[in-house]
Amino acid sequence: MNFTLPSLSLLSQSILSGIFVGALYGLMGLGLSLSWGLLRLINLAHFAFAFLAAYLCYQLSTMGMDPLLTMVVIVPAFFALGAGLHWVMVRFRVMPFNSLLLTFGLTGIAESVIQSIWTADFRKLESSYAQQKFKLAGLFVPVPELITLVLAVGLTFAVWAVLRYTDLGRAMRAAAQDAPVAAAFGVNQKALGLALAGTCAALASVAGVCLALSFTLAPSQMYAWVGVVFAAVMLGGLGSALGPLVAGTVIGISEAITMAVTAPSWAPIVSFTLLIVILVLRPGKTA
Amino acid sequence: MSFRRTPWVIVLAGAALAFVPQLGLPAFYDSLLYLMLHWVVLATSWNILSGYSGYFSFGHGAFFGAGIYTSANLMARHDWPFLWTLPAAAGVAAVLGVALGAVVFRVKGVRGELFALLTLAITFVIGTIVVNTPLDGGNGVSLAAVPVPKIGPTPSATFYLLALAAAVATLLIAWAIQVSKFGAGLFAIHDDEDAAEVLGVPTYRYKLVALAISCALAGMAGGIHALFLSYVTAGDVFTITVPLTVVLMSVLGGTRHWAGPAVGAVAITGLLYSFTAADHAVAGKAMIGVILIVAILFMPDGILERVRRLWQRRR
């Protein structure tokens, strides 16, 4: 391990990029955390949804659509997809652990579909946003990453407010805490579950559009996100709306600093060591 | 005493299969059969802890990888003969497993999906350490210069026979555990750990021993696989693929029976091969996904349990 002390401007630039990538971790983790915490389903297909959405965004924008405008089509489509998947899960009474395996199967299918349509080559979305960046207080701010950050923060707070202050959110939290009692108080759990699963998939598709905006896409890249995003979800607390964003940003920044101080290949160790420590020291708080 | 026949059946089947290299099949078949047996060892060893006691580990890749790197480094850097590296590979993997288990199994809350995640995280941490230290050096370890011992008529037959021996040993161990008091204890942990503890099952010690056995067998499989690959890179070893594959095989075959993972391993390796051979590798991946989904939805207890129930209904 070689330590090199980076200059101040390099360090602050890498912290900034850590915040940006952390926002995407948080956005990816948001839907995952909600479905795990409130529906008790571990949805690996969340990553498949995000990548499918990213490729759809890529496809639609090569056909001349504005990448951000593609969300008008993509988000409702994925809401339906997520609700449909949840209907199957409920219909067959899938256990939490089996949901992990089942959605892993789905992820494999999605990967093959992506590979046969768009090939295994790397794809990069060429949009009007991609090249834009501006300088703020001596730091470069790329526009696609900034869009991701704004969307992540906005959606996180929107979900948080809905869960906390609306009747819908209260019903959802009640159903997760004690399903029979909630049902006795008139909570329509079935409809609620479908809506929530749909929302999770819709959030995944937004994360996918952000992914397409600022990252190079390849079908096998899907699995690269699994570990880090799971770490963010666990650190943030299952079913929490603000948790993934906060934890994702912490992980993103610590990764960026690790990369700047040592070598990029050391980066994964930060998030996973954090995850292990959290799990061992306070396992009750995360689940 | 009908179940006491089982070990003899395993040994006899193994002895019969040992004659396959004498048939003079193309070397390719030896390799395919090697891979099947390799996955039988990995899936069955995983099942000893995870299937029996319900602690689904996603860290099998870490112990398998520890075996691979122990064996590869001893051969490439210290000129150990191949066969001597295998006990070392098993030993290192077991020590790693016990060290991990001694910490994790003391924490009451780490069960179910939390245990799965924790073990997965450990895989990535160990993988990162291996890539960044001289164990791998970032470029992988080449074993091209290491001679393959002449156990079978050809190198591929040698690997096949080694994997066969490992598979027979693993299946015997898995069977012996299942019918013993130790196995009953593990199944009790699976069903209700707190009740098992109250009824006098030493849950901590049982889990630790099961993990040690499971890791040692995975390490041994890794040691054999290192020379089979002849070029090891961390990027291919410490991934989510190994644990997911063994979980898939075991769940497909059935996790509450010693033979379940072996059934799943043979089925999935065979399926994957038939798709790659027909040049439909991408379709094969999708097919595996479909099979997994169908298996989970329609036979959540595994093929073996399903077949057994059908059998009982007919009688």
Image (tube, helix red, strand yellow):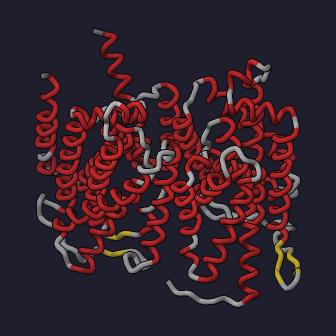
Q: Which quadrant of the structure image shows residue B227?
A: bottom left
| x and y, in percent, of residue B212 in the image | 29, 53
Q: Position of residue A207 (x, y in %)?
A: 75, 54
Q: For the point 81% across and 44% down, which residue is it?
A: A75
- The answer to whether B96 is drawn above or below residue A263 in the figure is above
Q: Closer to the camera, A263 or B193?
A: B193
Q: Is residue A118 above or below residue A238?
A: below
Residue B169 placement, left or right of A240: left
Q: Is residue B182 left or right of residue B299?
A: left
Viewer-nearest residue: B196 or A276:
B196
Q: Residue at x 49, y 63 (%)?
A: B124
Of the pair B196 and A48, the residue shown nearer to us: B196
Among all residues in the image, which is located at the extreme top? B315
- Residue at image coords 34%, 64%: B66
Percent coordinates x, y for residue B117 in the rendering: 52, 51
* Camera sees residue B266: no
Q: Which quadrant would residue B64 be assigned to in this image?
A: bottom left
Whether residue B208 is situated above or below residue A168 in the rendered picture: below
Residue B157 in the figure: left or right of residue B140: left
**Quarter containing the C terminus of chain B:** top left
Report the side of A258 relative to B68 (left or right): right
Of the 4 image quadrants, the one containing the N terminus of chain B is: top left
Whether residue B120 is visible to the viewer of this picture, yes or no, is yes
Q: For the point 60% across and 44% down, which residue is it?
A: A287
Choose top left, top right, bottom left or bottom right for residue A257: bottom right
The image shows residue B57 at horizontal and vertical percentages of: 43, 48
